[in-house]
Amino acid sequence: MVKIIDNDKYLDPPNTIEILNKLLNTPTLGGVKSLVDETFPTWFVTIMESYCSDYPHLLKNWKQLCELSGVNRAQIIIVDDISFDDSHTLIKAFAECFTRSGFVVRRKNEYIPCEKCGCAVPSEAMWGIFKEKGLQVPEKWNFYCTKC
């Protein structure tokens, strides 16, 4: 199981309804990103273009999700943390907004950039989870893609 870092800093603020209304009326993803930064300035960590090809199930799942939503794949957004309980409705709404637009939203403790090409490589903990589930993974975990 991947450890949740510190989900208390992303609890719904007292003005959550007001922010959700702003979100509903924000016409661009750039505007949504600005709203996120204004509300939770430490939430966004980085963006990666694709998953490491050593983990084909990740790209396959992302493609399927985008096809079902009728959108093109965008990027992988790495965030500080995500919680999906009732005290984090705003974070869930932000993540859902980006996901419905073709992005993948992942926690910083789950994925790191390949040291050589910058693609998203699962953390050692995620690699272990994938291996336990019998998914295709490299024999040994590493900080970079095997093709690099």
Image (tube, rainbow, N blue to C red):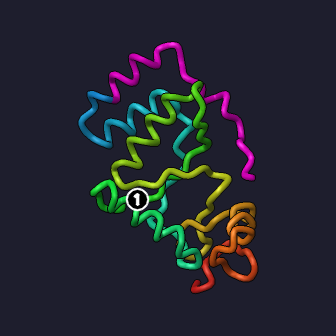
Taking 34 as reference, is 123 left or right? Answer: right
Q: Where does residue 66 sit, x and y in percent of width and height?
A: 36, 59
Q: Residue at x 32, y 42 (%)?
A: 30
Q: Where does residue 27 sit, x and y in percent of width and height?
A: 24, 36
What residue span does the magenta drawing correspond to?
Answer: 1-23
Residue 86 occupies which quadrant of the picture?
A: top right
Please say if 83 is above or below 58.
Answer: above
Taking 21 as reference, is 133 left or right? Answer: right
The amino acid on which the numbered mark 1 sits, given as a three-letter code, is Leu
Q: Where does residue 84 sit, x and y in percent of width and height?
A: 58, 36
Q: In the image, is residue 6 part of the stretch drawn in magenta?
A: yes
Q: Where does residue 44 sit, x and y in percent of width and height?
A: 52, 44
Q: Are there few (<14), some (14-19), or many (20+) residues within 10 Å of tag 1?
A: some
Secondary element under disc 1, as helix, strand or loop, is helix
Is residue 118 at all visible to an observer of this figure?
no
Q: Residue at x 40, y 59 (%)?
A: 65
Q: Residue furthest bottom?
A: 147
Front-most of 45 and 11? 11
Front-most of 124 and 128? 128
Taking 111 as reference, is 97 left or right? Answer: left
Please say if 70 is above or below 24.
Answer: below
Q: Residue at x 61, y 37 (%)?
A: 83
Residue bearing mark 1: 65
